[in-house]
Image: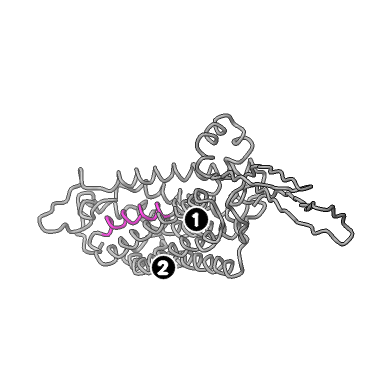
């Protein structure tokens, strides 16, 4: 402010020096406003659908809300508020030399800087914590797996919630007129690349954490692929956090055009947050479509009979032969028993499960041969053999 001559019209003064050969453009400059609005709108719509399905599965199943439900809904609310703030200030999603200085010094923009920094941390923290809490709830896990999940939860919340006191220390409004010192607030960008790198590690950790458990499940190929795809959607979060880290480094090193880098960073943060919401809500699809109100509907039964059962249920019919010999004669009976190649897994889902990973009925047939004792009747020239057959049905 001290370098601005008195009487300067801030609305006609660029906020930064353009590169050689480039002229400031306040009328129709290059902008990331459209990209920000389109990507954010698409992610809001997708995440809203999944959150509504998750809420519907809770209502139709009659189960109580769990911790992962609360954190998912909180994360959705926070990331949506953050997205609304970003879309409200797309007028600064430009190169800094194409932004009038009056826009960057406007009180509303200064409050936006503070608000988005405060909201950003809990939004992503709640969303990613919901995935880990989901892992904790749907699997009857071994102690080592449980400890790994708890460790991930602690790391997640420390990584993001530490951002709040840093924002209060560097970017909080001060003075009688509640002015934000942009120079002081800009120092917070040093923490950005560090947080981004740790966030990348966290996303990879969340992505790979369930796969050792899933690999031990005895599932048909189609169902196994479906489970891998379900949890594999977290890969999109890794891509978003990696791009965000690139833009954080650019924002730190190339400070002459910080607003452009920040606009790119905001898009990645929005995608990263909503992807976490979608990932933690994906298993609710199974619970929603299994609910009586949906499962008994004519449309769902038609889709299930023509598509779903062909993909996720690969049952086979195997003939079995039973032979009994009595009084020198033999008779052969052929019967067909419907079986499935699934065997019981050591990792089972609880009663309030979202997914029925092992829901295939199995018919077990056991044959027992009994030898006759010394008191049994033996007819000359005749061999007698008795076979007891026991059948039981259970679901995995």
Figure check: 150 above or below 298: below
Q: Secondary structure at mark 2?
A: helix
- Magenta includes 86? no
- Looking at the image, which residue is at 48% across and 54% down? 228
- Magenta includes 264? yes
Q: What label sits on residue 127 in the rendered view?
A: 1
User: Whole-Å distance between the Cαs marked 1 and 2?
Assistant: 16 Å
Q: Earlier in the sequence, mark 1 or mark 2?
A: 1
Q: Position of residue 155 (x, y in %)?
A: 50, 68
Q: Closer to the camera, 314 or 357?
A: 314
Q: Closer to the camera, 322 or 181?
A: 322
Figure check: 91 above or below 159: above
Q: Main secondary structure of the magenta part?
A: helix
Q: Position of residue 203 (x, y in %)?
A: 44, 62
Q: Position of residue 265 (x, y in %)?
A: 33, 57
The image quadrant of residue 250 is bottom left
Q: Which residues are magenta?
A: 258-272
Query: Is there any visible trace of residue 177 in the rendered image?
Result: no
Q: What label sits on residue 198 in the rendered view?
A: 2
Q: Closer to the camera, 337 or 376?
A: 376
Q: Residues within 10 Å of mark 1 (few under 14, many from 20)?
A: many
Residue that protrudes farthest toward the top in the picture: 298
Q: What label sits on residue 396 in the rendered view?
A: none
Q: Residues within 10 Å of mark 2 (few under 14, many from 20)?
A: some
Q: Secondary structure at mark 1?
A: helix
Q: Closer to the camera, 360 or 338?
A: 338
Residue that protrudes farthest toward the left in the picture: 21
Q: Quadrant of the N terminus?
A: bottom left
């Amino acid at each position: 402010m001290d370098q601005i001559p008195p009487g300067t019209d801030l609305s006609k003064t660029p906020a930064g020096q353009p590169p050689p050969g480039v002229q400031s453009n306040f009328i129709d400059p290059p902008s990331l406003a459209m990209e920000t609005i389109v990507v954010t709108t698409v992610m809001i719509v997708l995440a809203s659908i999944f959150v509504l399905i998750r809420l519907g599965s809770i209502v139709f199943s009659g189960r109580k809300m769990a911790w992962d439900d609360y954190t998912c809904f909180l994360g959705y609310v926070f990331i949506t508020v953050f997205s609304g703030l970003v879309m409200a200030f797309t007028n600064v999603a430009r190169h800094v030399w194409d932004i009038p200085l009056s826009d960057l010094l406007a009180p509303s923009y200064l409050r936006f800087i503070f608000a988005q920094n405060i909201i950003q941390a809990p939004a992503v923290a709640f969303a990613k914590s919901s995935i880990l809490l989901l892992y904790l709830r749907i699997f009857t896990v071994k102690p080592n797996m449980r400890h790994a999940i708890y460790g991930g939860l602690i790391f997640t919340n420390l990584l993001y919630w530490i951002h709040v006191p840093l924002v209060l220390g560097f970017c909080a409004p001060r003075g009688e007129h509640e002015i934000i010192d942009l120079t002081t607030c800009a120092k917070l960008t040093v923490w950005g690349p560090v947080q981004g790198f740790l966030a990348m590690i966290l996303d990879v950790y969340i992505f790979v954490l369930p796969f050792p458990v899933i690999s031990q499940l005895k599932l048909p190929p189609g169902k196994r692929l479906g489970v891998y795809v379900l949890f594999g959607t977290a890969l999109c979060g890794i891509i978003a956090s990696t791009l965000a880290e690139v833009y954080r480094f650019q924002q730190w090193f190339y400070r002459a055009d910080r607003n452009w880098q920040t606009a790119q960073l905001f898009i990645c943060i929005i995608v990263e947050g909503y992807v976490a919401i979608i990932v933690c809500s994906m298993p609710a699809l199974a619970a929603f479509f299994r609910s009586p109100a949906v499962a008994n509907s004519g449309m769902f039964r038609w889709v299930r009979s023509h598509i779903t059962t062909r993909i996720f249920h690969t049952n086979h019919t195997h003939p079995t032969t039973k032979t009994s010999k009595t009084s020198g004669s033999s008779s052969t009976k052929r019967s067909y028993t419907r079986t499935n190649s699934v065997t019981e897994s050591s990792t089972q889902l609880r009663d309030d499960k979202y997914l029925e990973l092992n829901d295939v009925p199995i018919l077990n047939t056991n044959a027992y041969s009994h030898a006759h004792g010394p008191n049994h009747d033996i007819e000359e020239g005749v061999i007698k053999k008795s076979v007891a057959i026991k059948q039981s049905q259970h679901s995995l």
